[in-house]
Image (cartoon, rainbow, N blue to C red):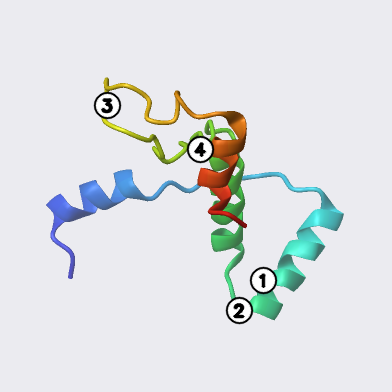
Amino acid sequence: MVCPCHMIWLRYLIMKTTVEIDDALFVRVRKHARRTGQSMRSLVEEGLRRCLDADRPATGYRLPDLSVGEAGGANPLESLSWHDVRDQIYGGR
C-alpha cells in the first residue's frame, strides 16, 4: 500500500493526456508496438524525446592539439624549407 504522501508525489511524476493521432499513423504505431513488444506509451515518449533531442545544438568537434615545440616558444619548423617540413611530416617516405 502506498502512503498518501507518496501518492501526491506520484501524481506529479506521471501525467496522463489525450493525443489525437492520424488513423494511418496510429495503425502503424500499434503494429510496431506489437512487433517490438513495446507499449504505445513508450513509443510516444521515445518519439517525443527524439524530436526534442534533435533540437539541441550539436556539440562541435574539437581538434586535438598537435602543436610542435613549447607553448609560447619559437616554432621549431620555422627555419626549415618546405621540402624539409615535408620530409619531417612524411618521415622520408
Q: Nearer the viewer, mark 4 or mark 3?
A: 3
Badge 4 crowding class, 10 Å Cα cut-off, few under 14, some 14 to 19, many 20 or more, is few
Give, as a three-letter code, the residue at label 2: Gly
Q: Amino acid at mark 3?
A: Ala
Crowding at label 1, few (<14), some or many (≥20) Cα neighbours within 10 Å?
some
Identify the image quadrant of the C terminus: bottom right
55 and 34: which is toward the camera: 55
Determine whether the residue tagged by mark 1 lies in a helix, strand or loop.
helix
Left or right side of 79 for 24: right
Q: Which residue is under mark 1?
A: 33
State which mark lies toward you, 1 or 4: 4
Residue positioned 59% across, 41% down in the render: 86
Residue 18 is situated, as x and y percent measured from the top left of the image, at 60, 45
Q: Is residue 81 left or right of residue 69?
A: right
Residue to which mark 4 is pinned: 61
Q: Residue furthest right?
A: 24
User: Residue 37 has which mark?
Assistant: 2
Q: Secondary structure at mark 2?
A: loop
Q: Is residue 47 left or right of residue 23?
A: left
Q: Label 3: state its secondary structure.
A: loop
Q: Is the residue 89 above or below the residue 27 in the image?
A: above
Q: CA distance from mark 4 to mark 2?
A: 37 Å
Quadrant where the N terminus sits is bottom left
